[in-house]
Structures are given as C-alpha cells and as structure tokens.
Image (cartoon, grey):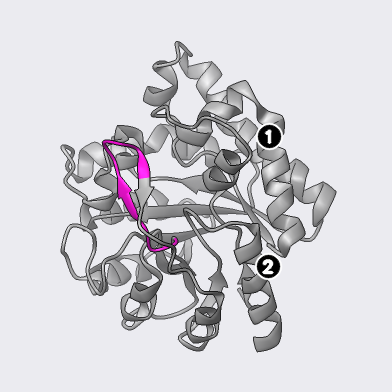
C-alpha cells in the first residue's frame, strides 16, 4: 500500500446486465461462472480498458449453499469459485498486466438474496457467521488473487466474524462496510468496526462500498490508515422486485474529496459502469 491511489472497477453485475444477461436468480452474476464465463472476462476487460487497475471477481454471491441450489456439489462449487479468480486474472493479463485481482468475499446477506446485506438483520451469530464464511474463504484464499475484497458487510457481528477468520492467516485483505452515514446498516457505530480491523494485520485497508456517494466522507471520518471507497450510484435496491429505484447520484468529481480524506482505493459498486470509472481514473491521475 505504499504506492499512490489505485482505481477499482465498478459494478460487474451492472455491466453484465447492460450487456443483456439475466441476473435475476439468487446467484446474481455468480451464475455466469457456470453458464457464460466468457462474458465475465469481457466485463472485467471493459473496466480495465476504462482505467481500472483492479478486477473484483464474480464471487460476491458465490457460496457452497448457493451453488447447491443449482445442483452442484461442493467440489464443483469450489471449482467455480476458483474460476472466478482465473477469469479476472485472464482479463488482467490481456488488458492490464500490472493490475490486481481482488477476490470478492461478499456478506452472508448476499447468499440470502433478501436485501439483508443492507440491513444486517441476520439469523446467525458471530460463531455461525464464522462457520458459514470459512469454507469459501479458504477456497478463495488459495485461488491466487492478489487481495481479498471482504465487502458490503452490514453489521458488527459479521465484521467480528471475518476479522477472526482473517487474523493470523497471513493473507492480504481489505474490509469494507455498506454504511449509512457513520453507522453500520444495522445502526451500530462504524468506529467499532474500524477498531476491530485495526487489530488484524491481514487487513491493509478499511472503508465503505455499496453506500450512497454522499455517505462516503462521513463514513470514513473516524477511520485510519489506507482507506477504500467505492459507493454505488445512490439508488435504492428493492429486494422483492430485484430492481434499483431512483436516479444515479454517482459523481466522479467526489473522488478528489475521498482521496483527500485518505482513500487509497477508489471506484464504484452497483450501477457504476465503465464510463464512470473512466472519470474516476481521470481524477486519480490529476490528484497524483
């Protein structure tokens, strides 16, 4: 983390949907790991061409339980998780050889596919969350990514669980919450999450993603060290209808304020496309 600011990619699923893929299943973009892996390589490539320096894998929604719903056994599920890293690496090698691959570790709520990653009202405690995350964390940790993107966490229980799972592993990870102002989505102080992460050497950056762009500065105010910021478009997610509502509020001009606040990894999340990332890249270049 000694180099200058790094440009992340945008919403992988957003781009895949824009290219005509049906992502209405509970597995979201992870379904294409089995059904159309070439489309994932192409989407990663578009973000690299737009100026992204990092490809975040299509494993956000991937889990053993989720793939079991497609009739896949544990071995096949693990193969698809590893494939997510291979596909991102392929795009990186073709488009930006000096780039990174970040293996996405999405929240338990992503598997539930009921919008709970934006609420944090889980039916598992810390021990249960640790047990649920551990198998796929092990697979993705060994898949050869440059960094683990532990992202969109909505509550302190899940932060505690993943900090505990990462602690002592020697892995490299960033930890990012889906915040609401200076609180987690479950209404807890974000400062407590930053404190937990500070005790884990494996976590090299902390921050927020899939929050409204207007919440980034407030969310990062009490965080220390290298920070990560990749909000969504600011639109609302209707979990029942599985659609986004409202107008985009993503403005790449905000990137300068994120960088000034200490962000070292900047980009976008849901509903943020290659054109937006191209503008983010321009601001990062101007700031350097």
Residue 55 in the figure: left or right of residue 140: right
Work out whether residue 147 or residue 200 is closer to the camera in this orientation and state it.
Answer: 147
Q: Where 27 falls versus 239 (above or below)?
A: above
Residue 4 makes an appearance in the image: no
Q: Which residue is mark 2?
A: 278
**Residue 73 in picture, x, y percent from top left:** 47, 13
Bounds of the magenta span? Answer: 233-243
Q: How many marks?
A: 2
Q: CA distance from mark 2 to mark 1?
A: 20 Å
Q: Taking the image as drawn, is residue 52 in sight?
A: yes
Q: Secondary structure at mark 2?
A: helix
In the drawing, does residue 191 fall left or right of residue 36?
A: left
Q: Quadrant of residue 58?
A: top right
Identify the residue shown where x is 32% and y is 49%: 237
Q: Quadrant of the N terminus?
A: bottom right
Tell me where residue 25 appears, x and y as whole percent.
42, 27
| Residue 129 image position (x, y, % from top left) | 26, 40
Category of crowding for the residue at label 1, using alpha-carbon neighbours closer than 10 angstroms: few (below 14), some (14–19), many (at least 20): some
Look at mark 1 in the image and give the residue it sits on: 39
Q: Give above or below for 10 relative to 105.
A: below
User: Between residues 39 and 124, which one lies in front from this camera angle?
Assistant: 39
SS for tag 1? helix
Contact? badges 2 and 1 (CB < 8 Å) = no
**Does the magenta run of residues contain 183?**
no
């Amino acid at each position: 983390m000694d180099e200058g600011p790094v440009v992340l990619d945008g919403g992988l699923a957003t781009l895949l949907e824009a290219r005509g893929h049906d992502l209405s299943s509970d597995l979201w973009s992870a379904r294409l790991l089995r059904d159309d892996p070439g489309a994932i390589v192409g989407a990663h490539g578009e973000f690299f061409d737009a100026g992204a320096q990092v490809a975040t894998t299509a494993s956000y929604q991937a889990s053993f339980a989720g793939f079991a719903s497609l009739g896949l056994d544990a071995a096949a599920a693990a193969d698809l998780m590893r494939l997510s890293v291979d596909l991102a690496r392929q795009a990186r090698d073709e488009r930006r050889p000096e780039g990174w691959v970040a293996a996405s570790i999405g929240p338990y709520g992503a598997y539930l596919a009921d919008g709970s990653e934006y609420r944090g009202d889980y039916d598992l405690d810390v021990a249960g969350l640790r047990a649920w995350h551990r198998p796929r964390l092990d697979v993705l940790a060994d898949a050869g990514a440059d960094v683990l993107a532990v992202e969109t966490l909505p509550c302190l229980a899940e932060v505690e669980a993943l900090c505990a799972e990462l602690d002592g592993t020697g892995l490299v990870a960033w930890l990012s919450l889906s915040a609401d102002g200076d609180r987690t989505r479950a209404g807890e102080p974000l400062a407590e999450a930053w404190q937990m992460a500070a005790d884990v050497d494996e976590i090299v950056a902390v921050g927020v993603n899939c929050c409204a762009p207007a919440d980034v500065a407030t969310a990062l105010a009490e965080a220390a060290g290298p920070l990560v910021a990749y909000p969504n478009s600011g639109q609302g997610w209707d979990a029942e209808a599985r659609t986004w509502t409202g107008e985009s509020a993503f403005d790449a001009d905000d990137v300068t304020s994120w960088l000034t606040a200490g962000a070292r990894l900047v980009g976008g999340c849901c509903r943020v496309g290659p054109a937006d990332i191209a503008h983010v890249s321009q601001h990062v270049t101007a700031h350097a």
